[in-house]
Amino acid sequence: MSYLVLARKYRPRTFEQMVGQEHVVQALSNALTQQRLHHAYLFTGTRGVGKTTVSRILAKSLNCVGPDGQGTVTATPCGVCQACTDIDAGRFVDYVELDAASNRGVDEISQLLDQAVYKPVVGRFKVYMIDEVHMLSNHAFNAMLKTLEEPPEYLKFVLATTDPQKVPPTVLSRCLQFNLRPMAPETVLEHLQHVLAAEQISAERGALRLLARAARGSMRDALSLTDQAIAFGSGTLSEAGVRQMLGAVDRGHVVRLLEALAAGDGVTLLATVDEMRVRGLAAAGALEEMATILQELAVLQVVPEVAQADDPDAAMLQALAQSLPPEDTQLLYSIALQGRNELGLAPDEYGGLTMALLRMLAFRPLTPGSSRPPAAPLQRSQTATTRMAPRVVDRAAAPAAVESATAAVPPRQAVRPAAPEAAAAGGDVPPWDDDVPLAPHPTEERQPAAPRRAEPQPAVIPSVQSTPLGDRWQALTAQMIERELVAALVRELALQSQCVAVDDTAQPPRWQLRVERETLASANAQARLAAALAEVLGHPVRLEVLVGATDDTPARRDAAAKARRQQEAEAVILNDPYVQALMSEFSTARVVPGSIKPL
């Protein structure tokens, strides 16, 4: 006899065996007991939560006749009568399961509805179960609306979908809707213990916890992963083996990362990341496990009453909860979630993980017991440092200090900001002193001050060593862009490349380009650029792209031309007689840098 996978072998046969869907079981059981039967049911939920299972149990409840053949509609089907066994085996003629993913057209639905006019052959009710109903076409939905609203009394519709948003409102309004929820990891773990006990397979609780968390609320996924773990561990489930199979990160590594963050120990932080890299542990798994532990920490810190004494990680969580303030836990949790989204954008997966951890270390407030060194101050002039440094003043001694300072410093020096000459000497100039001369003190002799103007800096023209091959390549690139033969990365490859050699005698002609950025020289981009070049030239070409320094590319030529136009425009403005007259008449007048744009 062939092996039957756990997900099929332990599929619930009655409502009592259903796990984690008590709200659906209670509603359907009461409706069956009171004979308040609707003609259409819609079960929604993610994969592996029991939509098809509930449908089959409902069909058995509607058609069960009991062991003696005298039963009626019941919430507890016997499982031994002909109807129950045939539905479990998938051969009951009055129970039809239709996969809408492969039968989504109006013809298939019309064929199904044509059979609705005939009464059941052997059962009490006909049950049409349409799985993944959101895959039906609009015409198919419209074809079934009338029958779905007023079916014969012996016909029941059961619809199942993982995406109820795609089901038309006209269909939703004709059905009783039940949302099957993803199952909690604790519920999955308890069911796995029951299944493995029935299979007489030993398993560590840590291994089952990993499987329950990896299932993400799906009982079918949990049982499938358990089958895989049994094969991987040769009949036993150990935590180390399951962790290796799943590629999950050992909690010990994540705990060391959190302890290093709590202590502000960057050396240990990076050393742990390097150890994880050597072992080949997933960076995304590390951030996911860290977010899980931080979520448990946040719950423990806010509601300590929920702590479970039998949890093997209870001592570890208590220690971390004492070393991390609650506000730090919330901050680290947010950065961990954001870091997972940024891993795909990082050049290297572990580089993204390192940056996320360093961000946690940098943004976490410095606590009194932390050993994190303060950041090195920016290089400032002595004048700016003295002016901007905050002072701690003793309020009790403040009047005396102010009085003595006022007596020691002349009034002129005590109230006047730094002189403009400080800027000329290399010091910082405060915002209020930008290009505005200080008003002289009433007791000082008024002296003319030379105005300081910020003239636009001349545009820097990139150096280009023009070559005949460069002229030819620039013209071809312009044609390819104008005819929209290249776009995105292929267009960038053409603009950033320098033509270094052309062999027209070869068959086909050989073109050799050189580009500085290796990321542009991908095989796909080269093939598309060669196709575009062949279309412009009118014959096939063989393109070779090398990586190296360039000094004559279409992009560099365009930049040089743009810089020359900018330089000419600035010269026209600065040499304009009217502009020069205004700058001579108003001593503080200036041309705002960046405001000149060439036409």
Image: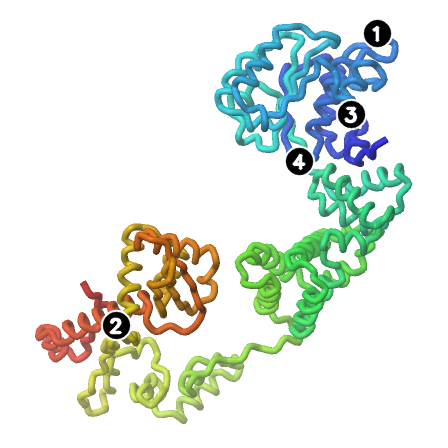
- Image: 332 above or below 193: below
The residue sitting at 17% across, 80% down in the picture is 587
Label for residue 337? none
User: Alpha-carbon distance for marks 4 and 2?
Assistant: 61 Å
Sequence-earlier tag: 3 or 4: 3
Q: Is residue 154 left or right of residue 376?
A: right
Label for residue 593? 2
The residue sitting at 58% across, 24% down in the picture is 103
Q: Dot 3 corresponds to which residue?
A: 15
Q: Dot 1 corresponds to which residue?
A: 70
The answer to which image quadrant residue 97 occupies is top right
Sequence-earlier tag: 2 or 1: 1
The quadrant in which the N terminus is found is top right
Q: Is residue 68 left or right of residue 329?
A: right
The label nearer to you, 3 versus 4, is 4
In this view of the protein, can residue 139 be seen by the observer? Answer: yes
User: Looking at the image, which is closer to me, 69 or 428?
Assistant: 69
